[in-house]
Image: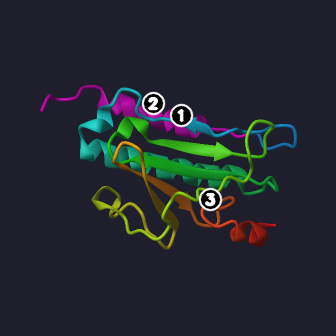
């Protein structure tokens, strides 16, 4: 395997992006599946070690979103999608009521009663996160990670009532 150069610089860039993340949550603003990919170059496609590091960074983004939305009354949804085949497809999403898409979204095609796969073991505590899995059209799985009590659930519309 070829030695990868510039990893420290890459993770500093991701940390900078995390620190600079800001969400405008006033009544006039909206987000339509706003998302961030941390790996455009495919570094995580070939390295489980780097893939897990990136997933940890996505989880840190959820923590940051929790801080940014703590005092807001604005309803939102936020989640991480993890592609079982390609780490470069992984992303974190933020979604609010908007003029272009439904809100709240409900991921009915996901099975929400799954255990973490090897890639996610030790990263995903099911007491803290909800994990879903969907079989995609390429014969792979896509995983959805949501932090419990952070925004409106994608899994159960009944949880919306509890938030309101």
The residue identified by callout 1 is 17
Residue at left offset 64%, top offset 40% = 33
Per the image, label 2 sits on a secondary structure element best described as: helix
* Lower position in the chain sequence, tag 3 or tag 2: 2
Residue at left offset 29%, top offset 37% = 45
Q: CA distance from mark 3 to mark 2?
A: 30 Å
Q: Is residue 118 left or right of residue 14?
A: left
* 10 Å crowding of disc 1: few (<14), some (14-19), many (20+): some
- Marks 1 and 2 close (CB-CB < 8 Å): yes
Per the image, label 1 sits on a secondary structure element best described as: helix
Q: CA distance from mark 1 to mark 2?
A: 6 Å
**Disc marking residue 2:** none
Residue placed farthest to the right in the image? 27
Q: Position of residue 63 (x, y in %)?
A: 57, 54
Q: CA distance from mark 1 to mark 3?
A: 25 Å
The residue identified by callout 3 is 154
Of the pair 96 and 27, the residue shown nearer to us: 96
Residue 106, quarter of picture: bottom right
Observer-side mark, 3 or 2, equals: 3
Q: Is residue 154 left or right of residue 97?
A: left
Q: Is residue 41 left or right of residue 27?
A: left
Magenta region: 1-23
The residue identified by callout 2 is 13
* 10 Å crowding of disc 3: few (<14), some (14-19), many (20+): many
């Amino acid at each position: 395997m070829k030695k990868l150069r510039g990893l420290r610089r890459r993770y500093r860039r991701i940390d900078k992006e995390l620190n600079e993340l800001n969400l405008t949550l006033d009544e006039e603003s909206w987000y339509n599946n706003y998302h961030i990919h941390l790996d455009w170059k495919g570094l995580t496609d070939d390295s489980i070690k780097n893939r897990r590091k990136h997933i940890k960074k996505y989880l840190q983004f959820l923590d940051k979103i929790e801080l940014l939305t703590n005092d807001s009354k604005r309803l939102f949804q936020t989640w991480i999608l993890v592609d079982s085949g390609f780490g470069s497809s992984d992303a974190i999403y933020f979604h609010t009521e908007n003029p272009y898409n439904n809100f709240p979204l409900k991921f009915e095609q996901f099975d929400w009663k799954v255990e973490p796969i090897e890639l996610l073991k030790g990263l995903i505590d099911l007491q803290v996160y909800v994990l879903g899995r969907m079989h995609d059209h390429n014969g792979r799985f896509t995983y959805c990670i949501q932090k419990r009590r952070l925004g409106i659930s994608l899994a159960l519309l009944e949880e919306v009532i509890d938030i309101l």
